[in-house]
Image: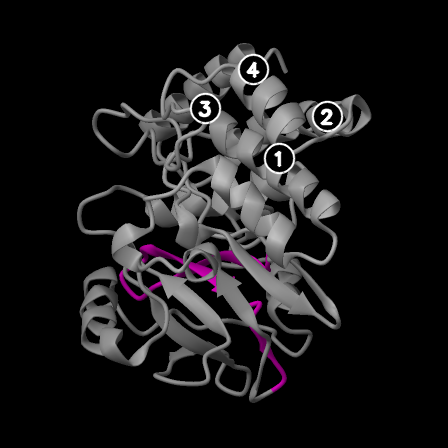
Amino acid sequence: MKRCPITYEPSGKSLYSDKGLKMLSQNLSTLELLSYTAGEQRAEAMARATKLSIQGVQPKLSAILNIKDSRFQLVDTGGKYILKPQHHIYPQLPENEDVTMRMAKAAGINVPLHGMIWSKDMSLTYFIKRFDRAGHKDRIPVEDFAQLAGLSRDTKYNYTMEELVLLIDEFCTFPVIEKAKLFRLVLFNFLTGNEDMHLKNFSVIRNGDKIELSPAYDLVNSTIVLKGGAEEIALSLAGKKRKLTRKVLVDYFGKERCGHTDKVIENNIQGLAQAKETWFGLLKICFLNKELKEKYISLLESRIKALAL
């Protein structure tokens, strides 16, 4: 029996479950294979790179969902989805990002609609719905923290988590609320081995008259993919990027730098702890291969122990 890459639910003989298709659109009853192999997608991403506002290590493509033709269609402008194909060096990044984003949602972290689709070579491509688009042409104001800090893509690591907190104080409408979201996200990233949360992976978004943290994105267990794994965090915390402890993450960052009360700290810790069973369940049924599943589970277990979660 097949499993739907959008919901992880059994899909019988079909590539997708009805529920997965309806998550994309209530008018969708089938979904054609993406008309590009993984290699062709990477070539398209390179050819279109100068026309897109989305960049980074992973190849990215802009797309719309063509309901009439039941397929994702690549576009240069006006895209509502970002597609990420298989990487030519790092194994199973789409599968990795998808399950990590699902784990984040289970932990009470706001994430956009996302999932995976089958390409014509039967490789999986990750998709995420853009949260900076509304309607056909309207754009929702979003700025990443590199922009807020006056830094560039080349200097996106030249910052600290302490300074990042100060940006929330300066730019967010209700900084106490947003710092609580940040605290949970930072703990989650530590637990799931996401060591590449640089300034461009944090953003603020305008929601009516309110400026708040955007939905989370680019959450990947980079530790099980990158060779070495010497660092545990992209932006230094208490002058450290490795050997982080509960004292550093909770007592120093949560209480001292974010200014959270014991109640806020406990609520966030409990929110993560309650998601543990779901996390391991997702990892068992996700689309990662056996080796990467085992590495992910092993790291998660060790990080849970380190945080005494």
- The Cα atoms of the two marked residues, 3 and 4, are separated by 12 Å
Amino acid type, callout 1: Phe
Q: Going from the N terminus, do you reach mark 2 or mark 1 first?
A: 1
Which x, y percent locates residue 266? 76, 23
Q: Going from the N terminus, do you reach mark 3 or mark 1 first?
A: 1
Q: Are marks 2 and 1 in contact (CB under 8 Å)?
A: yes
Label 3: element kind: loop
Label 4: element kind: helix
Tell me if residue 288 is in the magenta stretch. Answer: no
Give above or below for 100 relative to 112: above
Residue ID for mark 3: 238
- The Cα atoms of the two marked residues, 2 and 4, are separated by 12 Å
Q: Crowding near pointer 1: few (<14 within 10 Å), some, many (20+)?
A: many
* Res. 81 in view: yes
Give above or below for 8 relative to 139: above
Give the residue at the far right of this rendering: 263
Residue depicted at x 35% and y 57%: 151
- The Cα atoms of the two marked residues, 3 and 1, are separated by 15 Å
Residue ID for mark 4: 246
Query: Which segment is the magenta one?
Result: 112-135
Label number found at residue 183: 1
Q: Crowding near pointer 2: few (<14 within 10 Å), some, many (20+)?
A: some
Q: Crowding near pointer 4: few (<14 within 10 Å), some, many (20+)?
A: some
Give above or below for 108 relative to 277: below
Q: Crowding near pointer 3: few (<14 within 10 Å), some, many (20+)?
A: some
- The Cα atoms of the two marked residues, 4 and 1, are separated by 12 Å
Q: Going from the N terminus, do you reach mark 2 or mark 4 first?
A: 4
